[in-house]
Amino acid sequence: MLRGRRGSRVRALEGGPEEEAPPAVAEVPSALLPSLQQPEATAEQILLRGIFEIGRGSCDVVLSERALRWRPIVPERLAGDPKLDLLHKEEFIELKDIFSVKLKRRCSSKHQSGTLLGITLFICLKKEQNKLKDSTIDLINLSEDHCDLWFRQFKNILAGFSNRPKSLKIFLNPQSHKKEATQIYHEKVEPLLKLAGIKTDVTITEYEGHALSLLKECELQGFDGVVCVGGDGFANEVAHALLLRAQKNAGVETDYLLTLVRAQLPLGVIPAGSTNVLAHSLHGVPHVVTATLHIIMGHIQPVDVCTFSTMGKLLRFGFSAMFGFGGRTLALAEKCRWMSPNQRRDFAVIKALAKLKPEDCEISFLPFKSTQDLQERRAQRSPESDYSEQWQMIQGQFLNVSIMAIPCLCSVAPRGLAPNTRLNNGSMALIIVRNTSRPEFIKHLKRYASVRNQFNFPFVETYTVEEVKVQRKNNMSGHNPEEKNEPHEFVLENSFPWNVDGDLMEVTSEVHVRLHPRLISLYGGGAEAMNDSKVTCSCL
């Protein structure tokens, strides 16, 4: 009854072999139709009622304010048979799951439009593992007037979903991962957007930072949302640009980071990178069709954002960051861009583990207090106030420091790098891995791929925080002057690399990370409910 997009519907809508037409079925007065048991729809207004062929039989079809319901019509001579009653149960779809409606015609090579067969509804189905799938249901009736009446009613219903985008600005990074972003967009994303009647304006970026420079000045007034097709670094670039634009338009000084303005347009993230942490955290799965359908259906999630600043100057917006092993691994990978993504990642991890050394740091943090609203507290603070009596400080040798405002799901950590963090709970996870032996650190990393608690080690500490300051105490941390390094390795040893959403950020002084609740809206479907099992936060 429900079929995929590339099934028989395509032949019927776009042309195909001739088939015997089903008999025309006119609308029948409601009094002559069997009574439908609708316990959930008794209070709903019935908009239309008629007969369509669905599957292989004629059905009594009722369109109400919230759902489309149908029940096979049983011949009068067989009415009352309990076996048939079980086989002819009422079925339904909710109207909120329909994203497009088309008239179904048999096309021929001679004419542009052929014989009317009925109506095709395109629906969004929820599958296992948080995936969404597009499917169809055909309502067959050869009456032009009958189908036109129902078609117009469905169009009116779809027009009433004001949260769904009508026009999107799309940025596509052709260099993402294996340079597959363009193919992914044209083969999987664009057909669905066209089917939903969404207008698009596509810009293919030409260099790193191109989307950032374009979004500073380009006109967005006619768009309902912005979509990026690429990896985590590209998604971070577009999100950063949207937030910078919002502050500029509102006249907010970005160096005063206590109260910022939210981005005006929602952002859609189509996963086309190597890790796709943001899309995975948002949807529960890094699935292109799922991400696209969330955009089409207008599912929007407010998401917390971090600001990264040094010496009072904003460096960037982001969702997660790592310093130490996570930062050095990315820095090594960036120097091997000539390798394939998987080879580059594996090489960088092995190299960073081989040269594993702790960072001598001072970490200060402001613990999260759920009893008061974070925004209200910050509104009462002046730029000079730092609430020094509430800050806590940790000093020591650390192998890795993670600061995450989202769960950070990925293929190597299916439960998330920070499994207790949510997209918009107003706090960040601070995970500190103190100095330990290489075998113990590797054992900790391996735990991310299992269901066991990756933080159940004496050298791992987790905190729930609002703000964090990380100060590297010794610029020559961990460097042995007797060791011989290649020139580029020596520079790497003495740099201060951060991995911010898969993008490299190098600084030489203290980094101040602040959380800003619900600062941006992302197209997504609340994948938070998938894993509510309690664990503690995360790290690599």
Image (spheres, helix red, strand yellow):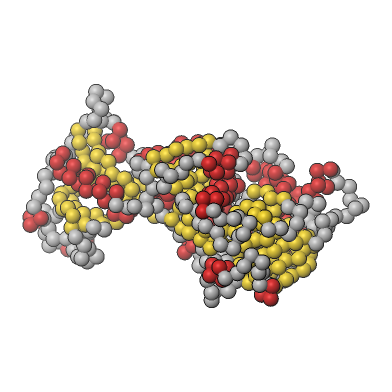
- Identified at 20% across, 46% down, the residue is 150
> On screen, 204 above or below 79?
above
Residue 526 location (% of width, % of height)? 46, 59
Viewer-nearest residue: 402 or 336: 402
Q: How many marks?
A: 0
- Identified at 57% across, 68% down, the residue is 378
> On screen, 188 above or below 366?
above
Residue 477 location (% of width, % of height)? 82, 58
| Residue 140 appears left or right of 485 | left
Is residue 273 in sight in this rendering?
Answer: no
| Residue 142 appears left or right of 290 | left
- Identified at 83% across, 47% down, the residue is 490
Q: Which image quadrant is residue 363 in?
A: bottom right
- Identified at 55% across, 68% down, the residue is 379
Residue 207 location (% of width, % of height)? 61, 37
Q: Which image quadrant is residue 211 in?
A: top right
Residue 442 location (% of width, % of height)? 72, 59
Viewer-nearest residue: 159 or 116: 159
| Residue 200 appears left or right of 28 | right
Q: Which image quadrant is residue 151 in?
A: top left
> Farthest residue in the right direction?
482
Viewer-nearest residue: 500 or 356: 500
Is residue 506 in sight in this rendering?
Answer: yes
| Residue 525 appears left or right of 83 | right
Which quadrant: the C terminus?
bottom right
